[in-house]
Amino acid sequence: MRNAAGQRASGPAVVVRSAAEAAAALELAGGTRPLLLSAPGAAGALGPRGWRALVARAARAVPGVAFEDALCCGAAPGHALAALRAGCRILVLADCPGSAAVAGAAAEAGALLLPARPAALDLAGLDLRKPGGRARLSRWLAATPMTECSSTARPRGTTPALKEDDAAMRLTPKVQEILSWYESDNPGTKANLARILMQGKLGGTGRMVILPVDQGFEHGPARSFAPNPAGYDPRYMFELALEAGLNAYAAPLGMIEAGAATYAGSIPTILKVNSSNSLSTTKDQAVTATVQDALRLGCSAIGFTIYPSSEHQFEMMEELRELAAEAKACGLAVVVWSYPRGPMLDKTGETALDICAYAAHMAALLGAHIIKVKPPTSAISLDAAKKTYEKHPIEDNPAARIRHVVQSCFGGRRLVVFSGGEAKGNDAILEEVRAIHEGGGNGSIMGRNAFQRPKSDALALLGAIINVYRH
């Protein structure tokens, strides 16, 4: 079976479920170069790092034997992408939604992607402690012809030993510094923050681009997805976030459920646990999902919106307090959308500098790990604040205003991302992103300006945004 580059997996193939079985295959390999093949769907059950550790233990037990190894990902492209990130270089992935994205990633990594499992001897049916079982394995290895394999970047016929720390996530100094800001959090919560910060093309930089898709709840399906009908299918959103190399994907319960199994482990997800809609006349949100939902779906964080200035702001803050406490106890991170709106604010006031900084500070005080606000304008809304800003002025440019909002989040010791807002042209978006970058913001959370474009246009825009944050 060949991939797009004409490469072939080596044989004879044997299905192994333990390091002992793998070692037995290597011990009896003779002059062959066997392919150690995982059990069906092992990428989900065992995980790519578990598989690499299993293979490495076998290689240490029987040194000097040339072999290859292949991890089966079933029909789950998310598992396949996670396996590529973990260093696996031969994968089995059935044709399924998202397989095209995996094929591109595999080609870029120099990996071999097989569309079906090769013929193999399953060692689960043999008693390798008895001569008969070992003889059967020896006959299979000797009788099965070998095929060419040039798919891996490592020297031909070798498998690198897996060091003890290879199975752990390697954190950059910047991510380690960010995690040190969250002094009260348990290892589970910090690990989930690290997963978000280490994901995608900005992984390890401390910068983020997140795809949020809660607009269907907020504005209705046609207003959200009619400009790009592919977006009606929730799986499209997973694929867009993956192909663009984003840090995370945020959505309400139903959208994450619609792709949870197929894309499990492929990208950190943020479960939006409260939502509003355009049929309401009140500035409030209903709680629409639970922390247990987030755990069940493998999410890295919950997301929650508060409306500072709303008549219901205090109830929303109390709901957040309870959900955040439960999420943190379970090892999840907390992302807070802090959007000022209510009877005392007009449209100008909702994005005024003093109000945006105030809203971001409230989110930090409420225990948010990641804070989402809108980019501020130069307006000052509160009469009580005007004298302070006159005495301690902020420079009248977008980067300085971003810097003030970041400063308001504990002197920059909380992660702050800025929304993309309503649809606008690429030049306006990139100008805003450059201001966020220059002002020390941690990134963008870009929804409609990404998924309402055709995929090729969305990928080009997101790539340009990522390039700004990279430099």
Image: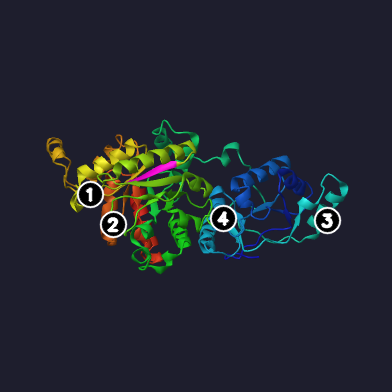
The CA distance from mark 1 to mark 2 is 19 Å
The answer to which of marks 4 and 3 sits earlier in the sequence is 4
User: Looking at the picture, which amino acid does disc 2 mark?
Assistant: Ile
Can you name the residue that lies furthest to the top here?
183
Q: Which quadrant of the view contains residue 318?
A: top left
The answer to which of marks 3 and 2 sits earlier in the sequence is 3
The color scheme shown is rainbow
User: Looking at the picture, which amino acid does disc 3 mark?
Assistant: Arg
Q: Is mark 1 on a helix, strand or loop?
A: helix
Q: Mark 2 points at which residue?
A: 429
Foreground residue among 279 and 216: 279
Residue 350 in the image, given as x and y percentages of width and height: 22, 49
Residue at position x 43%, y 44% from top?
Answer: 197
User: Horizontal placement of 211 versus 354: left or right?
Assistant: right
Q: Which quadrant of the view contains residue 207?
A: top left
The answer to which of marks 4 and 2 sits earlier in the sequence is 4
Q: Mark 3 points at which residue?
A: 139
The answer to which of marks 3 and 1 sits earlier in the sequence is 3
Q: What element carries label 3?
A: helix
Foreground residue among 242 and 53: 242
For the record, the magenta segment spans 333-337
The answer to which of marks 4 and 1 sits earlier in the sequence is 4
The tag on residue 80 is 4
**Res. 178 visible in picture:** yes
Q: Name the residue under label 1.
A: 350
